[in-house]
Image: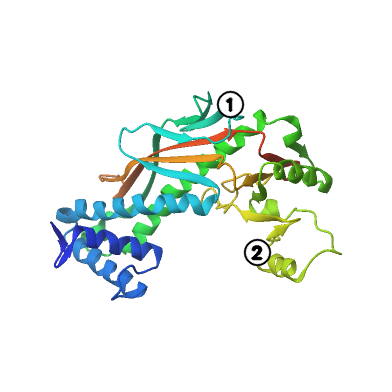
Amino acid sequence: MNFYKEFTKEQVFACAIDAYKGISTHKDFSAEERRETMEEILTELGKDYRSNKNKMFAIIEATLTEVLPQKVNEFIQFAEVKHFKWGETMRFKVKSKQIKAYAVALGATVKRNRMDHAYVTIEASNIQAKVYEEEMNLRINAVNWVELVDACIEAIADEINALIYRTFLDVYSTLPSANKHEGAGVDEAVLNRHLQIVSSYGTPVIFGTRRGLAELPLDSNLITDQDKADLRDRGFVGTYKGAKVYEIKNPVADVTNAKFAYDDSYLFVIPTGKENIVKVGFEGDAIVREKAGNDDWTVDFDMAQRLGVAVLQTHFMTIYKNTNFGE
């Protein structure tokens, strides 16, 4: 089946993925040409939206299915991400025999499970998001479809990332007392101890939101030129006492700009090189559907991806809560 003139379905899907990633996997075309080609394909299909919408949805679904795991790795670089077939049991092998339980995200709730023979089994749930477009724009083909695809990806990626973060926070109450701390500001001695604990299990890294990472205590006598450059460019140092520092991107929660998606209070210290304590499983492909007939003459594009998230409840990691930020 051809989607557009001489292109096969597989070629169109590859072009759409390239267009989103800003790359070219085709030896004869640049990244800019791939995006331009995708714009032409979607614009041509959009000339008869009602007849071609399922083809357009298939392009969006293929792009979502390919790109969403990458978006998870951008959000948290220490996750083990796997793709499973529809209906396949999502199981992850766990290396450490000392891990006895894990937290599994189930929609808005988190359930704690016991380990079963060194495997984590994750239950999938539907992660959903939506974007909308004016119906008149669809009728007159005045939609920038490449931008709409980008919006679809960002919307559902934000929902997935929020689920991962909520699951991470749930682990706080299960940690040994030595592995967690709550107090005003970031106490250097306590954070040093957290780094020492995590160093026993691997190479420690620190991650949190930009605002949270900006609170890392710095000795003015030890700040390097690289630290100064990091503070100028990013607002926090890239390395803290030998530990790499990673930012969790923290978008605004809604259009009021009054709140952000994630709590700035928390600094997480986890080991790398041993066990990926975050497990993310994608079940099947992403699904896109249209919901028309809204009273305001807009058309919703609903997206869903079946997904499971688990965070191992382990003495490998530490969490620091800075109460200066409040709730």
Mark 2 surroundings: few (<14), some (14-19) or many (≥20) residues within 10 A: few
Q: What residue type is labelled 2?
A: Arg
- Position of 107 compared to 247: left or right? left
**Residue 227 shown left or right of residue 59 in the figure:** right
| The quarter of the displayed image where residue 15 is located | bottom left
* Up-down relation of residue 156 to residue 118 (above or below): below
Residue at label 2?
Answer: 234
Q: What residue type is labelled 1?
A: Lys
Q: What separation in Å lies between label 2 and label 1 (alpha carbons)?
A: 38 Å
What residue appears at the point 34 percent right and 57 percent down from the top-left corner? 149
Q: Which of 281 and 247 is in front in this view?
A: 281
> Residue 2 appears in which quarter of the rendering?
bottom left
Horizontal arrangement in the rendering, residue 61 relative to residue 73 (left or right): left
Q: Where is residue 260 in the image (x, y as percent from the top left)?
A: 59, 49
Q: Say the numbered circle drawn on residue 100.
A: 1
Location of residue 121 with respect to 61 vertically, above or below: above
- Residue 53 location (% of width, % of height): 21, 53
- In this rendering, is residue 264 above or below 146? above
Contact check, label 2 and label 1, Cβ < 8 Å: no
- Label 1 neighbourhood size at 10 Å, few (<14), some (14-19), many (20+)? some
Decide if residue 327 is in sight here.
no
The quadrant the N terminus occupies is bottom left
Q: What element carries label 1?
A: loop
Horizontal side, residue 53 vs residue 116: left or right: left
Q: Residue at the location (80% across, 65% down)?
A: 223
Residue 44 visible to the viewer? yes
Residue 274 at x, y percent in the picture:
59, 43
Lower sequence index among marks 2 and 1:
1
